[in-house]
Amino acid sequence: MAGRTDAGAAPRAHRGGGEDWERELLGQLRPAGRDLGRLIAWLARATGAAVCLQDADGALLAGEPMALDAAVVADLVAGRISAAALDDGTRRLRLAAIRGPRPGPSAGAVLAVARTAPFDPHTAEILGHTAGVLELLLRERELTATGRRLRRVTADLRLAILQLLMVEDTVSARRVAAGLWPGLLEDDTARVYVVECASAERDRFADACVEATEGLALVVRCPAVDQHVIVVGPARAVGERLRALVAGRPETFLGGSLRQRLALTATAYTQAVTALAVARFHPARSAVYAERTRPERLMDPAALRAWSAVLLRPLDGLPHQVRAELLATTRLGLEFTAVSAAKVLGVSRNTVRARMDRVAVLVGADLASPAVRAALRLALNTEAAHGPADPDGPGAPHPVRLADLLGTGALRAWAGELLARLDGDGRDLRGTLRAWIAADANAERAALARGVHAQTVREHVRAAEPVLERRLLTGGSDLYEVVLAQLITGELAIPPLGPANPDQPDAAVHG
């Protein structure tokens, strides 16, 4: 490549051995000026030459492409020579090996400078000093890239630990955590916190959480929601430190769970998300999950555990880890969308659906029905909270039906009070809500049944949310409580649950 037409005339400021070029070169090391492209462009101007910087593999890093002698470049890269001077009759070429950040003689890059005029001592001095600056910049660039890789690997490990906890594999989670964060998961219990901030600020906020908790918590960038950071905090100081972080950052919110066993991390995560919804309206912008009266707390505990055990009995023949994985996935899938559950668990949404379908087939559940989903969630949460029960063990009560569980006076009073809140609205929100749930939460089908427009159904359901103090359109635990209330009052029929073969002995006790 021929040199530029003005190659014989270096800029006036750089002639005569003045210090202008030295000051400008040092300026390339300022934090705001550390850029390979800018430095190579400066070198081209300072020497009146064409300049090329390529990496050891020949890829262009900065400057303009240049045809170079492959054998000479190979010697420079291998460290056999440190510099070369070539003259092909039309241009004079200087090549220099720029050492890489790793020990050894091999080069990390090759600098080539070509021009028609001879290389005088002044130009050679500029090239020598520039090569030293390039070495520093390349070293910093490699260290920065290594730091990014380490941060990414660390973030991936944190997410992997969380996903193991989500499927109740606490042994593997502790094993993975022990190498990097010794003692992090030694406690058997923890709280889960979910912090919401602007997605553009999430990385910085996650780093702030790591710094504030000082190794006392597992900090994970939520794979499902770009604005969320998930924190698993076994130590009691974690919540206080997170609240202090949130207090100093407007438009940042914190939701926390109750303290749960590590095996119930998925349950704690659901509680934290629920508390986060409350935190958005709280002056302190933080909230802890409130243990309000839950319908399962008004049921006979022994009967509830026995009913749950019988319903889930078809899964008992599976290997322990497979069973735990299926149930943990189904619990998350019932609370969130398949897409969100998949991102949290680190699997595809088809895997989530396949696992849920397998559970549905085994227990004889039609998951399209909100009533069936509510009943299955009741059984899953009962086992998660109390562990598997032996329905045939000593002291076990006689098999009960779901209708028996829901027939107590305390439950009828709870359900009646909850649904009666809707009666004061002249739009018959109660009737619309009943039709919408009976139509599997399908507004169009509910509209046909009610003789109204589908948008009217959606508006009525949305209007019922603040009255009931529960989110309905997004599904999850709030909706399932309302479904159970309608089952208790008889506004919805008890759903069929059980094996497909009605001759099996379990079939008669599920519904």
Image (spheres, rainbow, N blue to C red):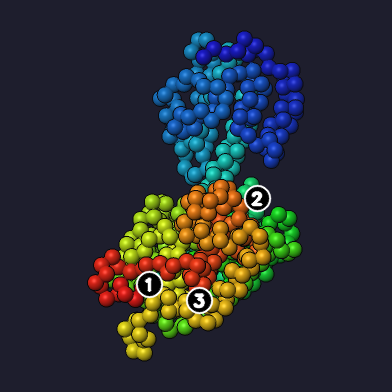
Q: Measuring 75% from the left and 21% from the top, which residue is drawn there?
A: 13
Compute the Cα span from label 2 to label 1.
46 Å
Characterize the local packing of mark 2: few (<14), some (14-19) or many (20 or more) Cα atoms within 10 angstroms.
few
Q: Which residue is mark 1?
A: 511
Amino acid type of the residue that numbered disc 3 sits on in the rendered structure:
Glu
Q: Which residue is mark 2?
A: 198
Q: Amino acid at mark 1?
A: Gly
Sequence order check: which comes first, mark 3 or mark 2? 2
| Residue for point 33% across, 86% down | 393
The residue type indicated by label 2 comes to Ala
Vertical placement of residue 436 versus 265, above or below: above
The label on residue 296 is 3
Query: Is residue 110 found left or right of 459 in the rendered image?
Result: left
Q: Could you say which is closer to the camera, residue 508 or residue 493?
A: 493
Across and down, in percent, residue 257 comes to 58, 69
What element does badge 3 sit on? helix
Structural distance between the alpha carbons of marks 3 and 2: 37 Å
Q: Please give the name of the residue rendered at 69% of the width and 40% of the height, measured from the top-left corner.
A: 31
User: Horizontally, is 507 left or right of 266 in the view?
Assistant: left
Q: Residue furthest left?
A: 503
The quarter of the rendered structure image containing the C terminus is: bottom left
